[in-house]
Amino acid sequence: MGAPAEPTRFAAVTGRYLHPAEETMSRDELAALQLARLRETLANAWANVPWQRERLDAAGLHPDALRQLDDLRRLPFTVKNDLRDHYPFGLFARPVEQLARIHASSGTTGKPTVVGYTAGDLDRWAALMARSMAATGARPGDVVHNAYGYGLFTGGLGAHAGAERLGCAVVPMSGGGTERQVALLMDFGARVLCATPSYALAIAEVAEQQGVDLRQSTLGIGIFGAEPWSAEMRAQIEARLGLRAHDIYGLSEIMGPGVACECECRDGLHGWEDHFLFELIDPDTGVPAAPGEAGELVITTLTKEALPMLRYRTRDITRLVTSRCACGRSHARILRVAGRNDDMLIIRGVNVYPSQIEAVLVGRTGFAPHYQLVIERRGMLDELRVEIEALPTVAAEAYEALAQDAQRHIKSLIGVTADVQVLAPGAVPRSQGKAVRVRDLRPRAG
Ligand code: DLL
């Protein structure tokens, strides 16, 4: 018998549910902890990963030579291809016999990226996910309906372990079987829903089709991530599910979900700096982004045993805020990730992220929040087509006028010319995990 140990480590501070020693320490204390942990991480990488040892030596960064956090900037970045080049286990700092779990990304091109965890890594991951969930307002005793995919994807098992650690009852749904999801959401009294934002919306839609009003359910909190989503999408999801939606960020190369999460203030996602070192760089030059400027997020793990990552380029574009949050937490905040560098489209010289188009169209009168972008090559030029569904209440005769109007808005707000096609309800494929927002029909080079 006896209560699980972890929840007792949280305390109600300024009305929040957090662990003060870990989450509210001063920035100086955080920096000192980071330096000590960075030394341990370098020592682990140097001693156990030949490729890392070579790089560290070449940079004159023997673990004992590290004087300050900024010294790390002497080390070149790590990129996804480095993991692929050492497929499957070449960058692991522990032999496979000492691993407790292996995850992998499906990878749209080439080999998957494979990541490994010791039992200690899994323990810290669960604690960080529990911390993230508590930050959103989830509490021990809550029922957590987990619709992130279980399997090689880190979403399902990551959220599962965190919810258990917090002292919640997890319903391990995984993605798919949406009608059943609706039924069990109603029957089991879930307060917390974990899913990708696009799948949360798919659940809302199926509920509406079945005549079930999820706004009347016990749902109160959504913990949504794994893909970019706009403020407009958040408003849609909240209105249709009757909950407060929180953004959660993470990536398998670094850990999985729970690298950063929005607290109840929803003023950026707290990046857990006692376990990760965050840098922002100019993606073109690699130099640090100016304070307050947007840049590519680069992450170094500080407590990973099996796969220490040093200066990993995430390709995710964001901003960092280091002032203390109203919740009392001192950990820096990552602002909503609008998209990945490699998802950025360049249409006739204009840079555009799919989520920018989403922000312009979703929530506009007449449109449903289901869309895809199609890129085609016409002669020498790339052309962008936006396929978006009309609401069921819109008559087909009105589609053309809606399209013209949307086209004008995209042009004036983003500066890009797009051919908008309004489709009938249900025409855009629904996701069960990460939504496919872009169909690139351009001929492949080579
Ligand atoms: O998506 C981990 C995760 C699971 C995060 C569940 C949140 C919730 P990967 O499959 O390795 O891991 O994909 C990581 O997804 O580099 C971002 O480009 C994107 N991403 C993740 N969270 C967000 C978010 C998981 N909140 C990649 N907003 C990352 C925008 C996100 N993009």
Image: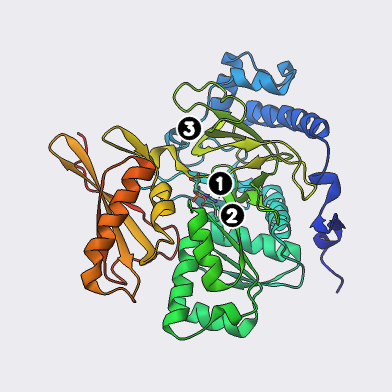
Query: Residue 203 at what x, y percent from top left?
Result: 47, 73
Residue occupying the far left of the picture:
379
Query: Residue 252 at what x, y percent from top left?
Result: 54, 47
Judged from the image, the secondary structure of the residue bearing numbered disc 3 is loop
Front-lying residue, 103 or 29: 29
Pointer 2 and pointer 1: residues touching (CB < 8 Å)? yes
Residue type pointed to by label 3: Val
Q: Residue at x 40, y 43 (%)?
A: 353
Q: CA distance from mark 3 to mark 2?
A: 25 Å
Q: CA distance from mark 1 to mark 3?
A: 22 Å
Q: How busy is the neighbourhood of tag 3: few (under 14 within 10 Å), some, or many (20 plus)?
A: some
Quadrant in which the N terminus appears = bottom right
Q: How busy is the neighbourhood of tag 1: few (under 14 within 10 Å), some, or many (20 plus)?
A: many
For label 2, being within 8 Å of ligand 1 is answered yes
Residue type pointed to by label 2: Asp
Count of numbered circles on the image: 3
Front-lying residue, 219 or 178: 219
| Left or right relative to 42: residue 330 | right
Residue 336, numbered label: 1
From the image, tell me which residue sits under label 2. 247
